[in-house]
Image (cartoon, grey):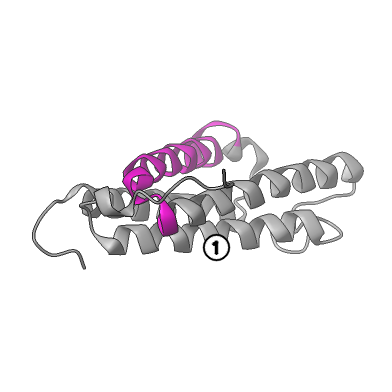
Amino acid sequence: MSLLPPSTNSGYAGSRLAAYGLMFLGAMTIVVGLIHFALPDGGIGIIAGVDLSVGRETIVSMAAWMGALQIAHGLALLIVGWRYRTLVPLLLLLTALERGLMALDGWLLKGPQAGHHPPEHYGSVAIVILCLALLGLSLRTGTSKS
C-alpha cells in the first residue's frame, strides 16, 4: 500500500490547462500560507497594512493558523492537478466557493466595517473569476486536450 492511490488522470477528459491552473493556484496558496506562517507579523502588518497595535499576538497567531491551513490546502490542489485530474472540476468549484465567500465578506459584510481592503480582497475576486473560467475548461470534453 502506498500513500497515494493510483492516478486518475486517464479518466480526465477536460483541458490540461485547467489542471495546470489548479496547480498554479495550489502553488500560490502555499506561498501565501508560508507568508502567514513564517513572517513575524504573518504579513498582516507588512503586506496587508493592518494596524497591529491592539491584539497583535492574537492576530498574528490567527494568521499563522490560517497559513498552516493554506499550506495543506495548496498541497492538495497541487496533488489533484498533478495526479487526480478527475477531481479538478470539484476542486475548482470549491476554490471558487471559498474565494467567493471571502470576497463577499471582504467587500460586503465585515470588510467595509474595517474601512480597509488588503490585497487579498482584490485577489479573491480575481481568483473566483479565474476558477470559474478554468472550471468551464475542465468540464469541456472536446477533441482538444490543450
* Residue that sits furthest to the left in the current view: 143
Q: In the image, what residue occupies the spot 67% across and 43% down?
A: 69
Span highlighted in magenta in the image: 81-110
**Which residue is most to the top?**
109
Q: Is residue 101 magenta?
A: yes
Observer-nearest residue: 137 or 111?
Answer: 137
In the image: residue 45, left or right of residue 8: right
The answer to whether residue 44 is above or below residue 91 is: below
- The relative height of residue 8 versus residue 101 in the rendered view (above or below) is below
The answer, for residue 84, to whether it is visible in the render is yes
How far across and down, in percent of the image, does residue 43 sit? 75, 59
Q: Is residue 68 left or right of residue 146?
A: right
Residue at horizontal 48%, vertical 58%? 25
Dominant secondary structure of the magenta stretch?
Answer: helix
- The residue closer to the viewer here, 104 or 38, is 38
Q: Residue at x 48, y 45 (%)?
A: 5
Residue 53 x %, y %: 90, 48
Q: Is residue 49 visible?
A: no
Circle 1 residue: 27
Residue ID at (57%, 43%): 1
Between residue 103 and residue 133, name the one nearer to us: 133
Mark 1 surroundings within 10 Å by alpha-carbon count, few (fewer than 14), some (14 through 19), many (20 or more): some
Q: Quadrant of the C terminus?
A: bottom left
Q: Amino acid at mark 1?
A: Ala
Magenta segment includes 97: yes
